[in-house]
Amino acid sequence: MRARLLTRLASAVLVLAVCCGVAPQASAADTPDPIADAKAFRDYFTKKFPKVKLEDFVNGPYSMNEDMYRQWEEKEQFPPYEFALEAGKEMFAKPFKNGKTYADCFANGGIGVRQTYPIFDEKEGKVITLELALNRCRQANGEAPYSYVKDEMASLTAYMAFTSRGKPMDIKIPNDPRALDAFQEGKRYFYTRRGQLNFSCATCHVQSPGERIRAEVLAPALGIMNAMPIYRSEWSGMGTTSRRFTSCNSQIRGVPLEPQSDEYRNLEYYLSYVSNGLPISGPGARP
Amino acid sequence: MRVRQYPIGPVVAAMLLIASLSCAYGEGSEADFKAAYAAADSAEKEAGVLRNQWTTTESTLAAAKKAAEAGNFDQAVALSKEAEALAKASIFQATSEKDAWKALEIR
């Protein structure tokens, strides 16, 4: 009788141990926890680069190296994105054929709202990026959408980013399982190796920021979205977030997905959320 | 001085046979190309479903087609087989990364 009781007790202890130990650990790893993820993300970079001020991470490779930082400060006197900024300001104000403007599509007339994008649209159940919102605005007003990777979109987003400069990134994840899924899918995309070179986004921007890849100094992933869109000397022009994602994929010999595909939208959502609190610095300039 | 004479007839015949066999082995026909290309294309489509195609697979497939159009089926078959191997590697990558990505995650 006593032996049976002991066996039962032992079994109960074993079940409890499994429930409280192994099983929850496995499920905890798979359960999205954006707040914990963002904290771990920030801690990783601040520990890796203790001399870099938190708000400086948004300056990408320039935050990683003193000489480059000085170059950047001088570059900012006559920034190469200035033409795009002027063009974007004009485009933003110019009415559509129906008389409405972009301001009619956004909260606060589109001024100082960039830091809230991407948003999660609970009606649609999907992530809406700023680029997507701009094209939807155009289409809703009878205009043809712009290419997501070319100059017009870069100019428009450059102007909107400029009106948000210094405002902290403020991405919300509503209490909606689809929003958590989008965050988790973005995270999965970020860490998944792809292309013939077998690189993930994290290979360059988590494991190797500050290191050189050929002539380029790799940017840290923390704050990387805050500087978008960017003027890249390598491109001799402006580039949107879509252009950055697709060209990253090509560089590792992966076939890029369609700009604004669900995967890229989720990736932008994840990367922006983990940089919450860091200031918007876009439009940026990069080597 | 007597020079020993070796019968060269069988040697020549053997060499000709080997040469003809190696030609037959190395030379791909249009049918061979079509079969090899279809296999590569099918693997690449599977990689597409997994959203993980490689640019090198695409360019190798295009090069295979170009070689076939130029009538160089030998090269076209070889390139198709290379493209199939690349596509299969990308499928393997996508499949193994379904869980492997978690190892890179910052926690």
Image (cartoon, coloured by chain):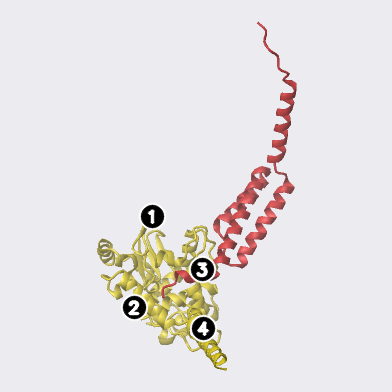
Chain colours: A yellow, B red
Reading the image, the residue beneath label 2 is: A278
Q: Nearer the viewer, residue A210 or A21?
A: A21
- As helix, strand or loop, the secondary structure at mark 1 comes to loop
Chain ID, mark 4: A
Reading the image, the residue beneath label 3 is: B100
Reading the image, the residue beneath label 4 is: A18
Asked if the residues shown at circle 1 and circle 3 are in contact, with their CB atoms under 8 angstroms apart, the answer is no
Question: Distance from label 4 to label 2 (Cα)?
Answer: 40 Å
B99 relative position to A205: left or right: right
Reading the image, the residue beneath label 1 is: A214
Seen in the picture, residue A185 relative to A257 is either above or below; the reply is below
Q: Nearer the viewer, residue A133 or B39?
A: B39
Q: Please say whether residue A145 is visible from this viewpoint.
A: no
Tell me the residue at 62%/48% (across/down): B79
The mark nearer the N terminus, 1 or 2, is 1
Chain ID, mark 2: A
Q: How crowded is mark 1: few (under 14 residues within 10 Å), some or many (20 or more)?
A: few
Q: Do labels 4 and 2 share a chain?
A: yes
